[in-house]
Amino acid sequence: MSDAGNRFRPLLGHRLFWPVAVLVAMLAANTIYRPGFLAIEVNNGHLYGTPIDILRLSAPLILVGLGMTLVISTGGIDLSVGSLCAISGAIACLYISRAPDQNNLVTVLTALAMALGVALVLGAWNGVLVSVIGIQPIIATLILMVAGRGLAQLIAEGQIITINSGPYRAIGLGHLLTLPLAIFIALAAALLVAAFTRRTALGMIVESVGGNREASRLAGIRSGRIVFLVYVVSAACAAIAGFMMTANVSSADGNNTGLWVELDAILAVVIGGTSLAGGRFYLSGTIVGALIIQTLTTTVYAMNISPQTALLFKAVVVIAVCLIQAPAFRAKFRRRRRGTPPPTPSAPQPQKEQVTA
Amino acid sequence: MRNMRMPMARRRAMAVVAAVLLAGGVAACGNSDTGGDGGDDGKLVLGFSQVGAESGWRTANTNSIKEAAAEAGIELKFDDAQQKQENQIKAIRNYIQQKVDVIAFSPVVESGWDTVLKEAKDAGIPVILTDRAVDSADTSLYKTFLGSDFVKEGRLSGEWLVENKKDATGDVNIVELQGTTGSAPANDRKKGFAEAIAADPKLKIIASQSGDFTRAGGKQVMEQFLKAHPKIDVLFAHNDDMGLGALEAITAAGKEPGKDITIITIDAVKDGMQALADGKFNFIAECSPLLGPQLMDLAKKVHAGEEVPPRIETEETTFTQEQAKEALPNRKY
């Protein structure tokens, strides 16, 4: 390899390189299709433009993804987050809709506290099922995924609850320093989770539980408590995401709020480089993953790809991202491009690289 | 949004929800609303099996049927199938055993009804379908199908637009928010609308995307439409909810809904009618759930052995802003 190639090696090897490259490529393709795609203008004192939309709309997914990252890093999975979004949104909107003054800040804060409280209890339920009773995470959280959607409809009595509350609306559409408030909420949550996991030993403990729960326990870590905790955190993240989703349209729809967001979140986590087997997690990767997913959705609308082909288009991009992310695939591709298959004795060489990368 | 418009996967998920709820005993009380005691007073007895209670539309549908039955002096045996065909078949078999005079139901799904409908036919009980059709090849299994014509709803919307824009000069750019991709109302409303606006070549659909019949979907799609197309004159949304979501996007873009952009939707649920009365929407084609009175008439007719047409459309209307202001106070859903 040339010198230049060597110099770029650390950059190319960075686990965020490929996801970011895909994101940039998508934005570039959009800009070629419509030069104004990245344009940002000031409208009513707020920044207005497609990039801002992407950031704002990906905020709920980033939140759900953060919780999901922690759950997945313990080797678990949380399928109930979509239903939790619907439940928390429905509770908050129901409380506000019944209040005499919907614009009262105390009313809104009470509604948020109540909904968050219920979400924490439901998260604890997931945590107990997984950590104490020992049910497999996919089954344990599946219960709340299906039952929770019914619960949300029960709370809303099968109706869409429409509210007209300024403070609540601000969660989804408010602005701070000309940028949507939702972006700051997601950012704050990300920084908080990062501080707790990466500035303390907590993150390493979570990873060690994901790597080997029993060995961690024998090493003195209360594995059960950590597993319990990540499901509660995931539920809290989902609840806040639920507030954003419902605030965005000032209404709670038990049928549709957060529908399939659990799958998007898992995808964001995987794109970000976190292994589904647990033992490692990358918060920044999840955030980039969430941005990619939202950019993909926005691309479909911006390029007016017909709804019939949109799903296929998304599938193709997602497959490409996942392949490009896989070190094994990249190694194979590199070898083929060089044209000279490595001699047999040195075959394990690339394997070793993967381990260190 | 009605359940039939949901994708299969979601319908299945809903079935699971129903199952879980049933197992938990939560739903046990929602089942038998017989609406009266005994059946020996010579009243006509109608057994009705409803899909479930998945939306405001459906709740209004149920209430309309219950009220109309009480008014018409018909004894109603009502069953909520909780989105499960199995429950619905069980309910119909119960009605056959109880020897009700007429059976009516809104099928949860289209297929798989032949056996139970044959049983009803053998027992000499006439069957009326409401709201949704079944795909049985043998149409003698039921007397009639009472429900909305989605193509017509789209066509009425398009015809109003042709009339409304007949004096406009230059191209009229239309964006369309479709319902759930592949669902019957989305396909039919799109078709009806396209047929109607073909009458005027200056009406052009410049973009069409699925908003999945939801407010969030409608809003997100409209945000991009507004950025991609500087000149949008008309928005046609396949239901009120997507239109309501789009309203927010239009306002955020610094445009005035109803004035800068003409908005046409379908359904006429309460929130949609409110927006129409407030001048934010311009036109709504109704998709009415209030088919109770028509159903009771039909039940009486088929019981008396009268011939009824095999397909009957729900009585539906359209609303302009003025009509919405008048109708809004009496709106039931």
Image (cartoon, coloured by chain):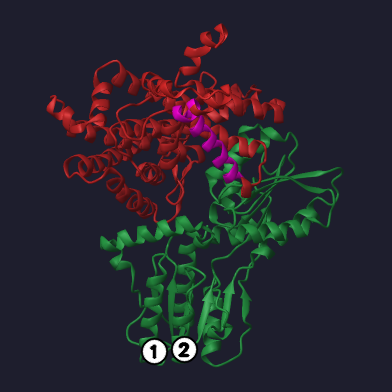
Q: Which of the pair B266/A232 is nearer the observer?
A: A232
**What residue would you read off at disc 2?**
B125
| Residue type marked 2 | Ile
Whether callout 1 and callout 2 share a subunit is answered yes
Residue B145 included in the magenta stretch of the image = no
Residue B99, labelled with which disc? Answer: 1
Instruction: Label 1, secondary structure: give it.
Output: loop
Q: What hue does chain B carry in this figure?
A: green
Q: Position of residue A171 (x, y in %)?
A: 45, 31
- Secondary structure found at label 2: loop
> Is residue A105 at all visible to an observer of this figure?
yes
Chief secondary structure of the magenta portion: helix
Looking at the image, which is closer to me, A9 or B47?
Answer: A9
The residue positioned 60% from the left and 71% from the top of the image is B314
In this view, A45 is above or below B317: above
Q: Quadrant of residue A53?
A: top right
Q: Which chain does the numbered disc 2 sit on?
A: B
* Residue A171 can be seen in this image: no
Name above or below for residue B332 compared with residue B126: above
- Is label 1 in contact with label 2 (beta carbons under 8 Å)? yes
Quarter of the image with the C terminus of chain A is top left
